Image: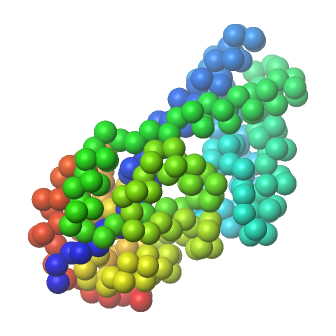
Amino acid sequence: MAIRSILFDLDDTLVVEGAAADAAFLATCKRAHEKHGINPEALHQAVRYHAGELWRASTTITYCRAIGISSWEGLWARFLGSDPNLKRLRAWAPTYRREAWFRALADHGVSDLSFAEELSATFLLERRARHTLFSDVEDSLTNLRKVYRLALVTNGAPDLQREKIQGTNLARYFDTILISGEVSVGKPDCRIFGLALDALAASPSETVMVGDSLTRDILGAQWTGLKGIWLNRLRNDAGNQVTPDVQITSLNQLHERLPALGNVNLSCL
């Protein structure tokens, strides 16, 4: 059966995420260098470390792992929504952010709670100023939309993912958008792929998933009976655990690879 529908991941597939977070951290940490002479990269690594420790020890860690919310996203998310887990995160977030920055500063001999709060607020602004698409996204989606039905399937907190989508004007390309924090299930769980298929009125055999994560995007898609196209922008080694059906290094390669994809076997729908 010919491919008629395409599911896309968001972070580091369409929207720059890792590099944007790094840039926001370093811009924030430069403030500590100006005030206390702290090396920005060293403080960046310290706040990442302490944020991760606090995140893993939180009462909502199981939910965050299932939905796909990372510790650094927790440093700028508002956690809007009615889900009880989001409410708990929303209440805890100010303490979490302040403590992560306070501990990172303390590693460098600075015990200043008010400055930790200042850096926390600065990071929110710096990260929100960086919503950027990869250079191949707009032309590729414009051309693909003429032929295929498109869906966006992303893990994350609803407010963060909606901000990224709005900030990059991506919604116009998609027939449907699913965010794990809005539907209470995240990749690689087959259920979120099933919801996307239902929204598109598509079958697994006529649908592919495009994403940068071998486990969440590719393996999850394959479990659901879709073929998985790994967007390997960094040309990493896939290893032996997950084998993508197709590997590309740019979205510009996608259109020419789709016609060659054939039928797939159903495994969990």
Residue 33, placed above or below residue 187: above
- At 72% from the left edge and 50% from the top edge, which residue is drawn? 78
Q: Is residue 7 left or right of residue 46?
A: left
Image quadrant holding the C terminus, namely bottom left
Q: Quadrant of residue 123?
A: top right
Q: Residue at x 66, y 62 (%)?
A: 64
Q: Nearer the viewer, residue 121 or 55?
A: 121
Placement of the N terminus among the 4 image quadrants: bottom left
Is 118 situated above or below 251?
above
Which residue is at 38% across, 51% downward? 13
Residue 10 is at least partly visible in this image: yes
Provide residue 113's location: percent of width, then percent of height. Answer: 88, 28
- Residue 65 seen by the camera: no
Residue 4 screen position, x and y as percent: 24, 75
Q: Is residue 103 left or right of residue 235?
A: right
Residue 227 to residue 56: above or below: below
Colour theme: rainbow
Q: Is residue 93 above or below residue 128?
A: below
Q: At which x and y percent is residue 154?
A: 49, 62
